[in-house]
Image: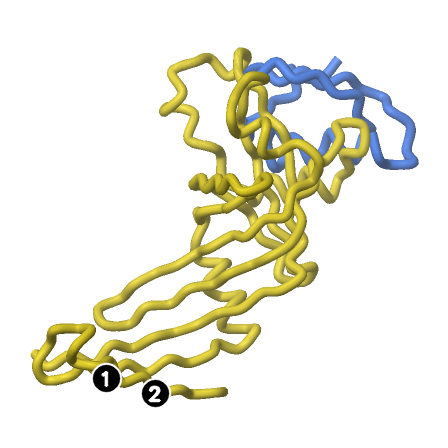
Amino acid sequence: MDRVIFIAPRALTGYEPMALNTQTELSPDETDAILGRHETGVISLARDDDPYAIPISYGYDPDERTFYLRLVSSPESEKRQFLASAPAARLVVYEEEADTYRSVVAQGQLQEIDRDDLSVEHIEQYGEAKRPLFEIWGEEKRDLDINLYRLVAETLSGREIIVERDH
Amino acid sequence: MGSEEEAEYTFVCPECGESLDVNASMKDALLDRGCVICGASVSRSAFA
């Protein structure tokens, strides 16, 4: 594993003495493990110069390096506009544990799965995907427009940073 | 339906109201994993 030591300049941190951070690139197995033990992340989309980031829940297939998502939108919504025409996307999942911070960034194209193309495999994958948080919508599910998407990771990277503090 | 098996059932989700034509394998998967669209639990009464 590559290991890089960052020494934060005192002028930037304001801390005395200086914080010493160790950043490590995670292995594919470690990266998959993080994605497997979490079920939510933040996905970012872009349209021209406008960014759009939303929290999502996902299911993850480590063999295919593919994320399965259900996204809820309405025809007039901002989300729908960003979801049009298979946008480029980045998904970030992170965790923190005491002084250890880990993050995974997946980059790829968000593709909608047509209802007519659904298969047994899709049903099984979406069984792993957690249900969207419908309670925040205040509408019956019948009134929501739920679409299925997958994100095949073209790049997938995991990082771990241990912050060594002077307690 | 993406499978080459012929559709034998019409699935209607009791929660989201989604209607899908499915084959026997997909029916079993829906019963086991829940509605593919909304994630709701599915019983045999959801199939016609």
Q: Residue at x 73, y 44 (%)?
A: A121
| Side (left or right) of A21 relative to A24 | left
Give residue A12's quadrant in the image.
Answer: bottom left
Q: Is residue B10 above or below residue A21?
A: above
Question: Please, which colouring scheme is shown?
Answer: by chain
Residue type at mark 1 is Leu
Mark 1 / mark 2, whichever is N-terminal: 2
Q: Position of residue A60 (x, y in %)?
A: 58, 53
Q: Position of residue A74 (x, y in %)?
A: 54, 19
Q: Which residue is mark 2?
A: A5
Residue shown at the point (22%, 68%) measured from the top left: A98
In this structure image, what is the colour of chain B? blue
Looking at the image, which residue is at 38% across and 16% down? A138
Where the C terminus of chain A falls, by quadrant? bottom left
Mark 1 touches mark 2? (CB < 8 Å): yes
Residue A20 tag number: 1
- Percent across and percent down for residue A36 are 50, 58
Marks 1 and 2 belong to one chain: yes
Viewer-proximal residue, B30 or A82? A82
